[in-house]
Image: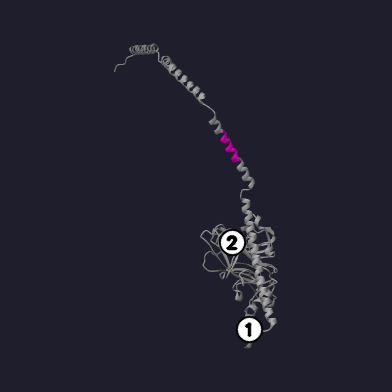
Amino acid sequence: MWLAALLPLAVATVQAQYVVESASFGHGSRSTISPNSFGIPGWHISGEGHVPQLVDKVVLTPPYPGNRRGAIWADTKIIQTEWTADFEFRATGPERGGGNLQIWYTKEGQAHVGTSSIYTVGKFDGLVLVVDTYGGRGGVIRGFLNDGNTEYKNHHNVDSLAFGHCDYPYRNLGRPSRIQIKQQRDSFEVDVDGKSCFKSDKIKLPPDYYFGISAASAETPDSFEVYKFILSTSSSFAREEPRRDTPNSHQQTANQQAENAPASSLKSTEAQFADLHNRLQTMSQSMDNLFRHLSTFSGNSESRHQELTRKMTSTDQLSAMDGRLQAIERTVQAIQRDVEGKDYQGQLAKLQDTLRDTHSSLIESLPRTMTQIVSTSRPRMGFFLFIVIVFQLLLAASYIIYKRRRANAPKKYL
C-alpha cells in the first residue's frame, strides 16, 4: 500500500527538471534579465552598429535603423549530455521588414561566431537553429549542423544544408514565441509553441559546447527581442553543480545582500566597514561597466568617423580641382581680352564686299543659265511629227493587207 503511494513521488522525482543557472536568464529571481542594466550575469553581450538594450528583455536588433547585429553568448560550457533549452523571443517590424535570428550551440562560442548569421559565419562546430522568412513563406524554422569543415559564408547554397524545418509565421504576433530544443538520450527534438517542429533520432550533440543567440536585421529592419533562455536538465547533479560565473559573480551576490540589509543590522564597526567596502566595490564595478560601454561607444564612433573620412574628398583632390578651375578661368579671361582688344572692322568689310560680288554675279548669270537650260531641254517638234506620220502609214498598210486577205479568203454558203 505504501509502495503505491510512493510510486508517483518517485516518478516525479525521476522526471524533475533542474535549471542550469550559469546558462539561464529571465526566470525566477532573475526575471529582470539584468540587475544593473549593463549586463547579464554569466553572459557576454556584443553588437555591431549599436549596443543591445537590456530592460525586461534583450533587444538584439532595434526597430530603427536597419543593418544592425546583436548577440549574447554564455560564458560557461554546457557539461550536461541531456538537456532542454527553453527560449522565448518576439519579432516586430513593418510589413516588408526582414532579418534573422540564430540559436547557436557551438564548440567555439563567442570567439568564432560572434554576431554572425547563418549566411556570414565561417567554419563552426555544432548546431544552429535559424528563424527567418526564407523562401517568402512568412516564417520558417530550420536546423543546421556543421562538423567544423564547411565554411558557410562561401558555400554556394547554404539553405540546402538544413536537416530539418517547419513553417512558423513568427512576425508581429503581439506575444512572445516559445522554442524548445530537447537533447535526450536517444533523440533530438525542436518544439514551437508546444507543437513539434522536427525531430531526429540520429543527432547526438556532445557536451562542453557554448550556447549563444544572435540576430541581424535587414535594410527595412525587424526588431528581435529575447525574453528568456532557460537551460534545464533531468540530471540531479546539476543542482549541486558549482556555479561557474564570471570572477565577480560571488562578489555581486555579496554586494546585493549587503544592499538589501537594513542599516540597523550593522552594529559592529567591522560590519559597517564591510558594508561600506561592498558598496564601494559595487560602485567600482558599475563604473567599470560604464567605462566599458563608453569604450565600446568610442570605438564605434571612431570607426564611423574613419568611414566618413574615407568617403569625404581629400585635400589633394580639392587642391587639384581648384587648380583646374583657375586654369579654365584664366583661359576664358584671355579669350575675352583677345576679343575686346582686336579690331575686326576690316575683316567684316572684306566679308561684306565678297557677299556683294557673289550676289551680283548670281543676278547676272542666272537668266542666261535658265534660258540655256530651257532651250536645250525642250522637245523636238520635227521628230515628233515624223513619228506621227510613220505611225499613220503603218496603220494604212495594215488595213490594206487585212482587206486583201479577207477578199481572197474562200466563202462558204449555207
Amino acid, disc 1: Ser
Magenta stretch: dominant SS?
Answer: helix
Does dot 2 land on a helix, a strand or a loop? strand
Q: Is residue 167 above or below residue 1?
A: above
Where in the figure is residue 224, as x and y percent of width and height? 57, 64
Front residue of this view, candidates 196 and 174: 174
Where in the figure is residue 321, as x and y percent of width and height? 61, 43
Q: Is residue 306 visible?
A: yes
Q: Is residue 103 visible?
A: no
Q: What residue is drawn where x is 64% and y is 83%? A: 265
Where in the figure is residue 47, as x and y percent of width and height? 62, 62
Q: Earlier in the sequence, mark 2 or mark 1?
A: 2
Q: Identify the residue position indicated by label 2 in the image.
A: 100
Q: Residue furthest bottom?
A: 1
Task: Place residue 335 in its image quadrant.
Answer: top right
Q: Is residue 107 above or below residue 277?
A: above
Where in the figure is residue 107, as x and y percent of width and height? 69, 65
Task: Place residue 272 in its image quadrant.
Answer: bottom right
Colouring of the image: one colour
Q: Identify the residue position indicated by label 1 in the image.
A: 264
Residue 336 magenta-highlighted: no
* Disc 2/disc 1 C-alpha distance (Å): 53 Å
Amino acid, disc 2: Asn
Front residue of this view, candidates 294 and 155: 294
Placement of the N terminus among the 4 image quadrants: bottom right
Q: Read off the magenta span.
A: 324-334
Q: Residues within 10 Å of mark 2 (few under 14, many from 20)?
A: many
